[in-house]
Image: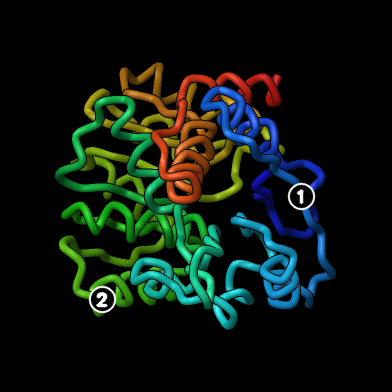
């Protein structure tokens, strides 16, 4: 039996175990997915211990995505992002990947969103960074709107310095309405809307030519998505992003095409 899992602190809320195990069951793979909760300073040691125990693969979440870089061989995308969320132990040292950026892209593609033109990403934290690189790698011009302008500018410069296909600019959050006028895609990569009935974007700034992805998945229908739907925009809830980062990890570990529908059903059952 192969063992896969997740390290994070905390991990009790994670929806990854039922999602991945639904995939194993559907594909008749003899595997289990378990969670590990090392102390806040124990991420790297946990990866080394997992390798010694014969664990086949790990997902990595907060607060360990940067810490584990020291004990893996990151692929080019993970190295550029400075964060790892998926580890494959088939090599020595284990290979580190970041599937968050791919999760955003595949979630949009699932909804037939054309990955071209101009995107606005609200937030310059970990999710924002992955989103910006994922979209820029597909040739989009990405405008980053963040409460702290300097952090948005720094992220935009790191995209430019890494020679990806697209370009990026860093802006203050006050500029978001102006940025959205000619935008094709909007991604909320902040937690705004998770614990309150509010949106990071004024409803009047949204329009029918937008595709709007909200990384928040609890609740699934956020104020931003309700406002976007009312404006005639295409809407993509955060569970799709969560699903497809897991799908990408599943396929890297097993070498098989992930049963997306089965994994999606298990994920959304956990959100009910």
* Residue 220: image tag: none
Residue holding disc 1: 35
Q: SS class of the residue under badge 1?
A: strand
Label 2: element kind: loop
Seen as rendered, the residue at the extreme bottom is 70
Point out which mark residue 162 bears.
2
Q: Residues within 10 Å of mark 1 (few under 14, many from 20)?
A: some
* Figure colour scheme: rainbow
User: What residue appears at the point 39 percent right and 70 percent down from the top-left corner?
Assistant: 75
Viewport quadrant of the N terminus: top right
Vertical position of residue 75 compared to residue 59: above or below: below
In the displayed structure image, the side of residue 11 where residue 174 appears, left or right: left
Quadrant of the rendered structure where residue 143 is? bottom left
Depth order, front residue of 138/29:
29
Q: List x then y, in percent, for residue 27.
A: 52, 27
Foreground mark, 2 or 1, reads 1
The C terminus: image quadrant: top right
Q: Position of residue 137 (x, y in %)?
A: 23, 58
* Quadrant in which residue 41 is drawn: bottom right
Q: Position of residue 39 (x, y in %)?
A: 84, 69
């Amino acid at each position: 039996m192969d063992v896969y899992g997740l390290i994070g602190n905390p991990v009790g809320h994670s929806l990854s175990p039922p999602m991945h195990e639904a995939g194993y069951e559907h594909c008749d793979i003899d595997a289990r997915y378990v969670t590990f909760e090392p102390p806040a300073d124990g991420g790297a040691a946990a990866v080394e211990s997992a390798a010694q125990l014969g664990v086949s693969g790990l997902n990595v979440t907060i607060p360990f995505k940067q810490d584990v870089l020291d004990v893996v061989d990151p692929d080019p995308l993970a190295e550029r992002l400075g964060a790892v969320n998926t580890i494959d132990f088939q090599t020595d040292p284990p290979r580190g990947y970041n599937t968050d950026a791919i999760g955003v892209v595949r979630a949009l593609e699932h909804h037939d969103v054309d990955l071209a033109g101009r995107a606005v990403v609200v937030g310059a934290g970990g999710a924002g960074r992955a989103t910006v690189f994922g979209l820029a790698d597909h040739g989009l011009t990405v405008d980053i709107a963040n409460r702290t302008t300097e952090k948005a500018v720094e992220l935009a410069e790191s995209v430019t310095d890494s020679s990806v296909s697209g370009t990026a600019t860093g802006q203050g959050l006050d500029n978001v309405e102006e940025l959205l006028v000619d935008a094709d895609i909007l991604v909320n990569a902040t937690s705004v809307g998770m614990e309150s009935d509010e949106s990071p974007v004024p409803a009047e700034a949204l329009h029918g030519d937008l595709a709007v992805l909200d990384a928040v998945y609890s609740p699934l229908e956020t104020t931003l998505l309700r406002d976007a739907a009312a404006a005639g925009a295409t809407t993509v809830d955060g569970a799709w992003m969560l699903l497809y980062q897991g799908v990408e990890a599943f396929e890297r570990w097993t070498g098989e095409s992930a049963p997306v529908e089965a994994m999606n059903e298990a994920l959304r059952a956990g959100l009910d």
